[in-house]
Amino acid sequence: MQLPAAVENYRPIVSAYASEFGMSDYVDLVLAVMTQESSGEGLDPMQASEGAYNTKYPKTPNGITDPQYSIWCGIQELKAALDKAGCTSPYDMEHIKLALQGYNYGPGFITWAKSHGGYSEPNALQ
């Protein structure tokens, strides 16, 4: 998959924060999330303003106005979702799907989905 140039421009920052948070093996996944969330555009490229790790900006859509801080928050949010989903590697697609849905819907979705058979398209549409 070719990533938008605006997303690729963030690769060095994503790589640095991914390393800081033990997510070096997931850099491409982080960039894919950024592509889905914003195509690398705007000041909140990870759309992380409403997440738990944002403590500096309003918790409203696009509340973060610092792209680096958005990435810092978003990587931690994604790591928490991957951990909660039980992801064991960047190739563990079953759990990555669940984590990505949790990144989008919030961590409560992961708990709910696990009690309803895990990730599935019908569960994702609930």
Image (cartoon, rainbow, N blue to C red):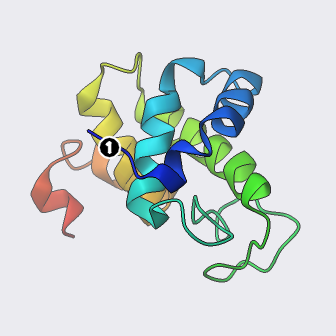
Residue appearing at x 60%, y 24% in the figure: 23
71 vs 2, nearest the viewer: 2
- Within 10 Å of disc 1 (Cα), the crowding (few <14, some 14-19, many 20+) is many
Would you place residue 87 above or below residue 82 in this image? Answer: above
**Residue at the far right in the pictured view:** 56
Number of numbered markers: 1
Q: Secondary structure at mark 1?
A: helix
Residue appearing at x 88%, y 67% in the figure: 56
Q: Quadrant of the C terminus?
A: bottom left
Q: Residue 65 is drawn in which quadrant?
A: bottom right
Q: Position of residue 34 (x, y in %)?
A: 49, 53
Q: Is residue 53 visible?
A: no
Left or right for 60, reference 95: right
Q: Position of residue 10 (x, y in %)?
A: 62, 45
Left or right for 45, reference 108: right
Residue appearing at x 64%, y 71% in the figure: 50
Badge 1 is on which residue?
98
75 vs 36, nearest the viewer: 36
Would you place residue 92 above or below residue 51 in this image? Answer: above
Q: Quadrant of the N terminus?
A: top left
Left or right for 28, reference 72: left
Q: Is residue 92 visible?
A: yes
**Residue at the far left in the pictured view:** 122
**Residue type marked 1:** Leu
**Residue at the far front in the pictured view:** 5
Residue appearing at x 67%, y 83% in the figure: 60
Q: Position of residue 58 (x, y in %)?
A: 79, 80
